[in-house]
Image (cartoon, rainbow, N blue to C red):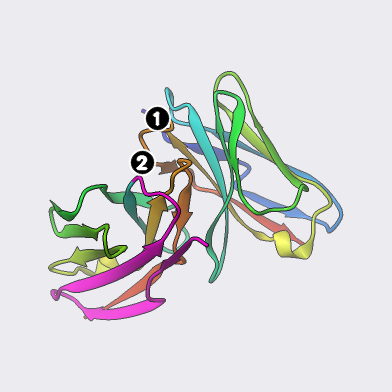
């Protein structure tokens, strides 16, 4: 069974631009969560989607948004990029909201200059 | 507030045993997870505890005490490949996972 895939793997953007990241969960997994990871900060929860609905949202500004499609694939968008948005963005999928074991994708490394 | 604490860094010797502690304060509890993350890679699942006690899985064991808000991950017969960060995460009442900052484990020959 294929794992979680994320595209693109690396991205360089300029401050003020916007970016869209994509995540394809493991086949059959319906829950997708997004995280931001920076050195020394650990995993910071962005949001969780299940059945195309946002179920939870972390403490991030409204510039961060996401969505989930009917095939469970998910995208996250960051508008008006800031230097502090430079981070590794990880997507994780799980079977549903009861089975918590999450499987992570390789991440998208975003650099904002 | 919700909080998870774990040591920032630990050092151990190849072949030895190391215990990584995690204490938590969360609103609601639906289980505690341990993940391993090698540098430059994504986290991978190690263990899940929802009841008090010890769960053993090969060289790795995880312990939970819900009354004390405490867990530990025990790694035996340490190998160089165990050098990684170990992340503690708690599932709260709304199904959301709350993550600790991770413990970087350095294994020396």
Q: Secondary structure at mark 1?
A: loop
Residue A97: in sight, yes or no? Answer: yes
**Residue matched to label 2:** A101
Q: What is the tally of numbered marks visible in this picture? A: 2
Q: Quadrant of residue B21?
A: bottom left
Packing grade of label 2 (10 A; few <14, some 14-19, many >=20) is many
Give the spatial CA distance, label 2 vs label 1: 8 Å
* Front position in the image: B31 or B41: B31
Q: Position of residue B26 (x, y in %)?
A: 43, 57
Mark 2 element type = loop
For this rendering, which residue is in front, B1 or B57?
B1
Determine the residue positioned at 32% across, 79% down: B10
| Quadrant housing the N terminus of chain A | top left
* Span shown in magenta: B1-30
Q: Are marks 2 and 1 on the same chain?
A: yes
Measured from the top left, where is residue B81 in percent x and y?
A: 27, 65
Q: In the rendered structure, are the residues bearing label 2 and label 1 in contact, judged by CB atoms less than 8 Å apart?
A: yes
At a point 14% along the width and 59% down the height, the residue shown is B59
Neighbourhood count class around disc 1 (C-alpha, 10 Å): few under 14, some 14–19, many 20 upward: some
Q: Which residue is mark 1?
A: A95
Q: Residue furthest right?
A: A16
* Farthest-out residue, top: A70
> In this rendering, is residue B17 above or below B86?
below
Q: Earlier in the sequence, mark 2 or mark 1?
A: 1
> Closer to the camera, A100 or A112?
A100
């Amino acid at each position: 069974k294929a794992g979680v895939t994320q595209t693109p793997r690396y991205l360089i953007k300029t401050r003020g631009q916007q970016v869209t990241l994509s995540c394809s969960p493991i086949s059959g997994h319906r829950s997708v969560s997004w995280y931001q990871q920076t050195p020394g900060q650990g995993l910071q929860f962005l949001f969780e989607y299940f059945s195309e609905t946002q179920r939870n949202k972390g403490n991030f500004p409204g510039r961060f948004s996401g969505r989930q499609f009917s095939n469970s694939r998910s995208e996250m968008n960051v508008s008006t990029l800031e230097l502090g948005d430079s981070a590794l963005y990880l997507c994780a999928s799980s079977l549903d909201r009861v089975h918590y074991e999450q499987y992570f994708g390789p991440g998208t490394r975003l650099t904002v200059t | 507030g919700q909080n998870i604490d774990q040591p920032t860094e630990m050092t151990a010797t190849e072949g030895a045993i190391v215990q990584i502690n995690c204490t938590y304060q969360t609103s609601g509890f639906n289980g505690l997870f341990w993940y391993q993350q090698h540098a430059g890679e994504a986290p991978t699942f190690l263990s899940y505890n929802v009841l008090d006690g010890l769960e053993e899985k090969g060289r790795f064991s995880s312990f939970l005490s819900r009354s004390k808000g405490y867990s530990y991950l025990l790694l035996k017969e340490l190998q160089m490949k165990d050098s990684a960060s170990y992340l503690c995460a708690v599932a709260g009442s709304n199904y959301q996972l709350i993550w600790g900052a991770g413990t970087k484990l350095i294994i020396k020959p």
